[in-house]
Image: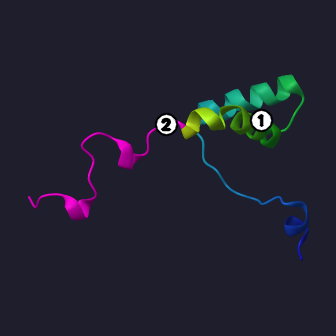
């Protein structure tokens, strides 16, 4: 078992706009925390609101390509 598997952490690359990264870094510095910590807290705080966002299948008039009329 690797160290990653033992502690439940996993490395992942995410891409953010430069301006957003700067803002997150500023908050991390202000809070004396890591970027990872700030993003984890942001997720924990906002996940219930994100869960309420409609998925693409929930948008009015949306149908999967297989159900659309041919052009």
Q: Residue 1: percent from the left, percent from the top?
A: 89, 77
Q: Residue furthest bottom?
A: 1
Q: Main secondary structure of the magenta part?
A: loop
| Most foreground residue, 6 or 13 | 6
N-terminal of the two: label 1 or label 2?
Answer: 1
Q: Residue 37: percent from the left, percent from the top?
A: 82, 39
Question: Mark 1 or 2, which is nearer the eye?
Answer: 2
Q: How is the image coloured?
A: rainbow
Write down the region rendered in magenta.
Answer: 52-71
Q: Which residue is mark 1?
A: 41
User: In which image quadrant can residue 43 be found?
Assistant: top right
- Residue 5 falls left or right of residue 58: right
User: Residue 57 colored magenta?
Assistant: yes
Q: Secondary structure at mark 2?
A: loop
Q: Secondary structure at mark 1?
A: helix
Q: Which residue is mark 2?
A: 53
Q: Residue 15: percent from the left, percent from the top?
A: 60, 47
Identified at 77% across, 35% down, the residue is 41
- Residue 1 falls left or right of residue 13: right
Quarter of the image containing the C terminus? bottom left
Q: CA distance from mark 1 to mark 2?
A: 19 Å
Density class for disc 2 (Cα within 10 Å; few <14, some 14-19, many ≥20) is few
Identified at 81% across, 30% down, the residue is 28
Identified at 76% across, 59% down, the residue is 11
> Are discs 1 and 2 less than 8 Å apart at CB?
no
């Amino acid at each position: 078992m690797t160290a990653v598997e033992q502690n439940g952490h996993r490395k992942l690359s995410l891409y953010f706009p430069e301006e957003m990264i700067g803002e997150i870094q500023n908050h991390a510095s202000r809070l004396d925390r890591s970027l990872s910590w700030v993003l984890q807290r942001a997720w924990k705080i906002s996940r219930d609101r994100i869960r309420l966002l409609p998925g693409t299948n929930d948008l009015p008039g949306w149908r999967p390509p297989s159900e659309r009329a041919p052009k």
